[in-house]
Image (tube, grey):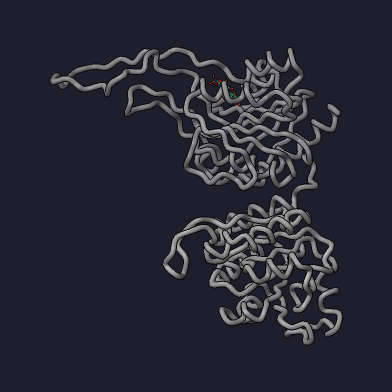
């Protein structure tokens, strides 16, 4: 698959401070992935960091100079004495990853004795720090109190993870992997977006309807479109609840995950989260039927090779119809968006569902195309709204499709306000 830019990172100026930890190799990957996503990444290294990796490594992956010295300007063009001020200007975000215990102590005390610490003091943009150190150093009261001080100054701290250290010991202090760091960065860069302060609920995946303790009925949904929608809503600054019937995909950083299995469980989770919600997006493929009884024990086959087994199915509740009633009574959610998975008469069926389910917008999805619908990384949909407007979206990644849906959600909310 072709790697595409991440919209919320596109053309953003990110300063990446790198300090002396074995986790520096992960910072190289982070710098590379941010650059590939469309950000302009400038690296500042402490002296200790250069023992682990050379500035040239960062320069190679970012295409920009890596600064190392307060008094000299690395291989870049900035005049010497104002390097720190120049670096802080026009910066959207400053990230320090990995941040050692020593750097945390310096920042907490407001010391300014190298290019990185002086740049942090001069910067006016949001600052994220990702501590990485031995477990005992991380737990030490001095480090914890420094972190509390930094949090108190609105610096965002990415908690280290548990794992095995270079020393062989196990504890908390490992720098999270690149996707986690990227998730936090997206969250901060998107927080003033079009859904800032809004509560968005997204359902995703195919529900599972148990037949016995071993088996269940489900469908071909993978949850990819729903998860991309949750990420797009986060990128737009929303507070996101993801009600998911799949556990195969990583939860987007910042989303509150509500795991469910069956349609009935999904309904209960939606009912519980809808009060006060601005937007509900039902991207889940909800099973319309479930086995009438769930066998307590595994269903065994008999000796007869011609044996037939009949499973009786009963109707599941229609979640969107329930939400329609709730919305009439309470006013929540303020905007409801549904999907229509169709194999024929796409627009006609979708429009009928829009009406019947009381939706503001429906995403009509032709599931017969191999490059669209279930399991594909791309999709091709038509957005139909209550006012008769029709917007056809060309084949695009599920992320781009999600961004278009989220921007329609923001517009619908704007009209409601
Ligand atoms: N949906 C729902 N509850 C159900 C079934 C579907 O809330 N029990 C939602 C889906 O999440 C989707 C929309 O309704 O947003 C349309 O789903 P779809 O499967 O296309 O249609 P159905 O209503 O199930 O109708 P049919 O299967 O007859 O096409």
Q: Quadrant of residue 219?
A: top left
Residue 308 left/right relative to 391: left
Height in image: 273 above or below 399? Answer: above
Place residue 213 in its image quadrant: top left
Q: Position of residue 129 (x, y in %)?
A: 68, 61
Residue 367 visible somewhere in the drawing:
no
Could you say which is closer to the camera, residue 53 or residue 142?
A: 142
| Name of the residue lying farthest toward the front | 141
Look at the picture and state if 84 lies above or below 245: below
Q: State the quadrant of the C terminus.
A: top right
Residue 406 picture location, percent across and down: 72, 39
Would residue 374 be seen by someone viewing this image from the given angle?
Answer: yes
Foreground: 52 or 281?
52
- Residue 195 falls left or right of residue 363: right
Total count of labels: 0
Q: Residue furthest left?
A: 303
Quarter assignment of residue 390: top right
Residue displayed at 58% across by 82% down? 51
The residue sitting at 40% across, 26% down in the picture is: 217
Residue 15: % across, % down: 74, 68
Determine the residue positioned at 68% across, 16% down: 324
Quarter that holds the N terminus: bottom right
Q: Quadrant of ligand 1?
A: top right
Q: Position of residue 192 (x, y in %)?
A: 80, 47
Residue at 63% across / 77% down in the picture?
Answer: 60
Decide: is 160 above or below 41. above
């Amino acid at each position: 698959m072709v790697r595409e830019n991440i919209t919320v990172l596109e053309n953003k100026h990110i300063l990446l401070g790198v300090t002396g930890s074995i986790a520096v190799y992960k910072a190289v990957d982070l710098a590379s992935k941010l650059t590939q996503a469309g950000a302009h990444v400038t690296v500042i290294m402490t002296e200790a960091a250069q023992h682990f990796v050379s500035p040239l490594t960062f320069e190679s992956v970012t295409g920009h100079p890596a600064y190392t010295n307060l008094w000299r300007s690395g291989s870049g063009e900035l005049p010497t004495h104002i390097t720190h001020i120049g670096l802080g200007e026009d910066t959207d975000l400053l990230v320090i990853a990995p941040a050692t215990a020593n750097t945390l102590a310096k920042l907490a005390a407001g010391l300014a004795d190298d290019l990185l610490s002086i740049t942090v003091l001069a910067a006016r943009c949001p600052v994220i720090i990702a501590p990485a150190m031995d477990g005992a150093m991380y737990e030490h009261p001095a480090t914890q109190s420094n972190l509390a001080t930094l949090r108190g100054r609105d610096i965002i701290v990415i908690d280290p993870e548990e794992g095995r250290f270079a020393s062989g010991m196990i504890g908390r202090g490992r720098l999270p992997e690149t996707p986690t760091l990227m998730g936090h960065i997206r969250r901060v860069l998107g927080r003033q977006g079009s859904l800032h302060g809004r509560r968005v609920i997204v359902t995703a995946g195919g529900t599972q309807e148990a037949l016995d303790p071993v088996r269940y009925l489900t469908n071909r949904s993978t949850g990819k479109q729903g998860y991309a929608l949750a990420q797009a809503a986060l990128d737009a600054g929303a507070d996101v609840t993801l009600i998911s019937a799949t556990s195969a995909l990583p939860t987007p950083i910042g989303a509150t995950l509500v795991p469910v299995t069956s349609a009935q469980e999904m309904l209960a989770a939606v009912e519980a989260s809808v009060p006060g919600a601005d937007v509900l997006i039902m991207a889940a493929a909800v099973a319309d039927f479930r086995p009438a009884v769930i066998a307590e024990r595994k269903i065994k086959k008999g000796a007869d090779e011609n044996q037939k087994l009949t499973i009786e199915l009963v109707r599941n509740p229609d979640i969107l119809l329930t939400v329609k009633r709730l919305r009439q009574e309470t006013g929540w959610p303020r905007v409801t968006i549904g999907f229509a998975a169709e194999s024929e008469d796409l627009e006609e069926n979708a429009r009928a569902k829009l009406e019947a389910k009381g939706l503001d917008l429906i995403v009509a999805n032709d599931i017969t195309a191999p490059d669209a619908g279930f399991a594909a990384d791309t999709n091709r949909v038509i957005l139909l709204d209550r006012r008769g407007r029709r917007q056809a979206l060309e084949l695009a990644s599920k992320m781009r499709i999600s961004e278009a849906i989220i921007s329609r959600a923001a517009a619908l909310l704007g009209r409601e306000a």
